Amino acid sequence: MRTQVVIIGAGPAGLALGRLLEQAGVDAIILERKSANYVLGRIRAGVLEWGSVELLDRAGAGARMHAEGLVHHGTALSFDGDRMHIDFTDLVGKQVMVYGQTEVTRDLMDIRQGTTVYEAEDVQLHDFDGKPWVSYSKDGTTHRIDCDFIAGCDGYHGVSRASLPASAVSTFERVYPFGWLGVLVDKPPVDPELIYAHHERGFALCSQRSPTRSRYYVQVAADEKVEAWSDTRFWDELRRRLDPQTAERIETGESIEKSIAPLRSFVAEPLRFGRLFLAGDAAHIVPPTGAKGLNLALSDVALLGSALIEALQDGSAAGIDTYSVRALERIWKAERFSWWMTSLLHVFPETGDFGRRIQRAEFDYLMGSRAARQSLAENYVGLP
């Protein structure tokens, strides 16, 4: 079998890349080691930069997003009960869209016209410095796909980055000493916009999936077990960390999903290895504080899609030769913003009282400086 591009991974990055390529008439096969139902069962956040919204529109995957997504013109930050509003529209003239990553994946699945092989086992990448090909097993039979390029969109634990010799890639990582305990509940959101809260007991976030479904988070120790948290304990802890007016308005209920997500920052460099390219979580991880994970993945594939189309249809290597540098420039800026938001809003036991006073000074500076709020808004809604 032969195709022009083999895409490893059928998450939003792989599916979006596949869609951009097929719109341009480039043939691509997507290989995914999990089932389609498993992929759609992943619970993920979804705050979309407006550039991501426009990309999904161009891909023809935006109709349900516009019908069901929630446009947010700002967000709220609080510190020990003191609250301020960051007005994106006023500060930078842009907005964000709250629309779950699972729904983005479903929409991209629904419009896909090319071949996607789910439950592809033992995927292996071969000769990506020369004439690349990919092998995999399905229903006990081994298959081979020859191709021009391979796109590794298979996440942090995927085979794409793992196929590289250690000497070929540099990695940069920070693992945070805490995680987010998240609860999904079928109750209306406490506020029309997201609320990020710093409290001496730890960080909290009030988020949402729809007008009737909410997602709430609290900071917990990295070794915390989700079984230790009853719904009652969670709601009590969340209320403690919010300003009194917000805490009083929360509608609690039985959780329909509860999990703990660890926090880490991670970047791999470079992103090109001959005819193999990394994109999305295979290349980078950000803490969820800045809402950048999905947006970075879509930004990567927007660049990569254009580069591959240019190489295959125009015979120009300009795009693929600069993909890694261009993508990493934006990745590191998003890493910086996510690190900054995490540093401002979480409790770091090792920094002590001095660290909290610095955080308070940073919060007060934001409240008093339009320029500081404008910088936050510019990064949150998405850099070009």
Image (spheres, grey):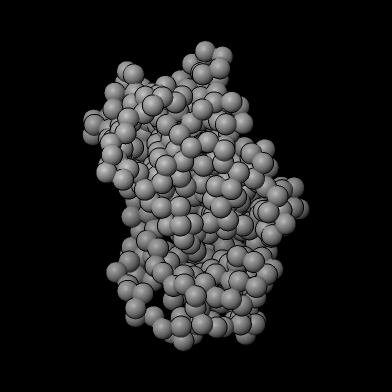
Q: Residue furthest top?
A: 315
Q: Residue furthest left?
A: 166
30 above or below 288? above
**Front-most of residues 161 and 30:** 30
Whether residue 340 is visible to the viewer of this picture, yes or no, is: no
**Front-most of residues 332 and 368:** 332
Residue 305: x, y in percent? 54, 30
- The residue lying at 51 percent from left, 82 percent from top is 254
Residue 137: x, y in percent? 29, 40
Q: Quick one: quadrant of the C terminus?
A: top right
Q: Which image quadrant is residue 180 in?
A: bottom left
Give the tally of numbered discs.
0
47 above or below 138? below
Q: Is residue 158 left or right of residue 153?
A: left
- The residue lying at 60 percent from left, 27 percent from top is 24
**Front-most of residues 202 and 349:** 202
Whether residue 165 is visible to the viewer of this picture, yes or no, is: yes
Q: Quick one: quadrant of the N terminus?
A: top left
**Front-most of residues 291 and 160:** 160
Residue 61: x, y in percent? 64, 45
Q: Is residue 340 left or right of residue 131?
A: right
Q: Is residue 87 left or right of residue 224?
A: right
- The residue lying at 44 percent from left, 38 percent from top is 30
Residue 114: x, y in percent? 53, 36
- The residue lying at 42 percent from left, 21 percent from top is 148
